[in-house]
Structure formats: structure tokens, C-alpha cells
């Protein structure tokens, strides 16, 4: 069975102009030049100190870049990106005529701008369509699918001006280019990787009990070891200390069991404990 749903909480920003690629290339974590028809790029915008502000999928056609992003973050993105235009030939605008969809696990036969979700192979397809498409799934069903895979979902799982990309899997999931030129926040991102500074990770957890609210503290015995992020039903995401992944955890009356997905690379002690 193939599933498809509209994602009403996501929208599209259009970048046009001769300098659109060079403009965005100097700002985001991934290589914008690799975006092409049928190939989307997942990237993040960071603070100058290397902390997460937003992430999005970058689509490209002959004369535009299209950023598929959280609808609630669009005003912030238009404002922040607009500050860096200077004399570059680029314009930015919201495109309300495009509707964001996702299908999984196979490519759907539907009209629109379509590309695989670049984070994992054979996981899902992102679709920008001029009209809402016929859906046989819900956003909640998609949410369960991405939680099962252990993928972060923007502001549901990351904290603006605090989260670090490598804590949230952007390295393994292809959200960072280590070979492109400079971009805003690159120094801290590179230092975090090469000095092995990651001490916490955003990890999927199995939930036994009531689903904890986002932001709830997580404990291992009496020691606080993390914080709950997003969740649905009996699956969730939690930001956890690496040395706390070997045993079940508690969040109020709920027991959380860390579940390290196959794509995630951890230091050896943490990896064997998950």
C-alpha cells in the first residue's frame, strides 16, 4: 500500500534571480548546488554561533529554488534571509499556490514537483502541487511513520537558538555538507564533529504509559538525563545523554526505552547499549 497526505502545516518560499543559488549557498548547512529537478536537498539555517533556527527541503527547477518549510517559520525565514540579500540578484516570496504533500514508501503517480525525501533511502517522497491531491492518509499517520524511523521534525524536536545539528542526526541524515565552502554557523558545526563534542542525541523512544508533554524532564533513577520532544501514541523523540541509552528511563509515571535506529552512528559504548 502506498500512502499520501497533505501537510497543511508546511508551506513554500520561492527564491528567484540569477544569484539565488550563490545567495543560499553561503547561508545554509548543505550544498545548494546539488538541488536539481527530481532531487531535493535537506538543509538548516543556523545562527552565527551554529545553533539551529530552521530546516527545510530545497527543490530546484529551471529558474527557481523552492524551500519547503514549516508554515509557522515562514515569516522568520523571509525576514532573516532577506537581511543578507544586499546587492545580490535574488528575490524571496511566499508561494501560497503550492500545497505540500508527502507520500510513502513509493513514488506516487501524481502531478507536481516531486523528489525523494533525501534523509533516508526508500523512505518517502515530497510533493509540491498546485492543488490539494487526493489523500488516503493523514498528517498523523505520516507523523507515526517518521517517528518509527527516528527522524526529527523541525521545531517539534529542536529548540531555536539552542539545538546543535549533530545532536539531531543531521550528519547521518545528509543535512550537512562537509566539503562546500563557508556558511553561517559552520565553525561550531565543524568543531562539534571533529572534536567529538556531542554528548547528547535526539533518539526515538518507546513509550510505556501516558505520552509525556514536550519539554518534560527525563530521569534515570534520580539523575536527570534528558528532555522529551515530540511524540504520538507509543512512540516519541527525546534528547538524551549518550551515557543514558543503555537502560529504560522514566518521565513521570511513564517508562521510556531508547531505540537507536540503524542509520544512527554513536560512540561505541552508547551504540552497544542502545
Image (cartoon, helix red, strand yellow):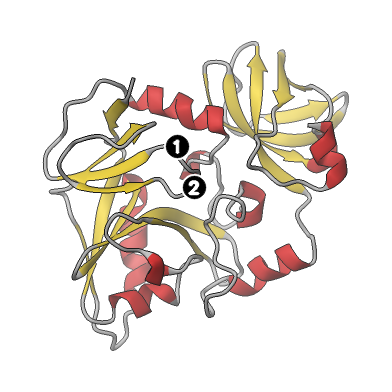
| Above/below status of 129 relative to 52 | above
Q: Nearer the viewer, residue 245 or 118?
A: 118
User: In the drawing, what numbered circle is on residue 25?
Assistant: none
**Any part of residue 164 in sight:** no
- In the rendered image, residue 250, in percent from the top left (x then y), is placed at 76, 21
Identify which residue is drawn at 75% across, 54% down.
Answer: 198
Left or right, 235 with respect to 153, comes to: right
- In the rendered image, residue 206, in percent from the top left (x then y), is placed at 65, 21
Asked if the residues shown at circle 2 and circle 1 are in contact, with their CB atoms under 8 angstroms apart, the answer is yes
- In the rendered image, residue 255, in percent from the top left (x then y), is placed at 73, 16
Structural distance between the alpha carbons of marks 2 and 1:
8 Å
Q: Secondary structure at mark 1?
A: loop
Residue position for label 2: 119
Q: Nearer the viewer, residue 270 or 94?
A: 270
Badge 2 crowding class, 10 Å Cα cut-off, few under 14, some 14 to 19, many 20 or more, is many
Residue position for label 1: 123
Amino acid at each position: 500500500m502506498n500512502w499520501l497526505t497533505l501537510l497543511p502545516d508546511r508551506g513554500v518560499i520561492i527564491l528567484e534571480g540569477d544569484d539565488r543559488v550563490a545567495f543560499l549557498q553561503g547561508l545554509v548547512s548543505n550544498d545548494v548546488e546539488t538541488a536539481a529537478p527530481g532531487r531535493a536537498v535537506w538543509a538548516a539555517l543556523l545562527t552565527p554561533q551554529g545553533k539551529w533556527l530552521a530546516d527545510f527541503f530545497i527543490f530546484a527547477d529551471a529558474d527557481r529554488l523552492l524551500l519547503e518549510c514549516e508554515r509557522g517559520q515562514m515569516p522568520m525565514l523571509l525576514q532573516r534571509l532577506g537581511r543578507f540579500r544586499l546587492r545580490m540578484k535574488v528575490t524571496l516570496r511566499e508561494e501560497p499556490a503550492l500545497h505540500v504533500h508527502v507520500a510513502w514508501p513509493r513514488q506516487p503517480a501524481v502531478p507536481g514537483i516531486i523528489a525523494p525525501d533525501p534523509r533516508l533511502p526508500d523512505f518517502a517522497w515530497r510533493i509540491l502541487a498546485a492543488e490539494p491531491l487526493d489523500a488516503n492518509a493523514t498528517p498523523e499517520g505520516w507523523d507515526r511513520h517518521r517517528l518509527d524511523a527516528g527522524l526529527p521534525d523541525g521545531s517539534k524536536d529542536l529548540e531555536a537558538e539552542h539545538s546543535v545539528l549533530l545532536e539531531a542526526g543531521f550528519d547521518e541524515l545528509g543535512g550537512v555538507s562537509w566539503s562546500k565552502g563557508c556558511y553561517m554557523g559552520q565553525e561550531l558545526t565543524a568543531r562539534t564533529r571533529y572534536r567529538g563534542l556531542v554528548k547528547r542525541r535526539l533518539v526515538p523512544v518507546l513509550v510505556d504509559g501516558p505520552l509525556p508533554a514536550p519539554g518534560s524532564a527525563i530521569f534515570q533513577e534520580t539523575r536527570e538525563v534528558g528532555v522529551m520532544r515530540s511524540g504520538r501514541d507509543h512512540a516519541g523523540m527525546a534528547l538524551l545523554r549518550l551515557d543514558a541509552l543503555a537502560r529504560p528511563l522514566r518521565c513521570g509515571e511513564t517508562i521510556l526505552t531508547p531505540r537507536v535506529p540503524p542509520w544512527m552512528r554513536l560512540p561505541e559504548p552508547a551504540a552497544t547499549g542502545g
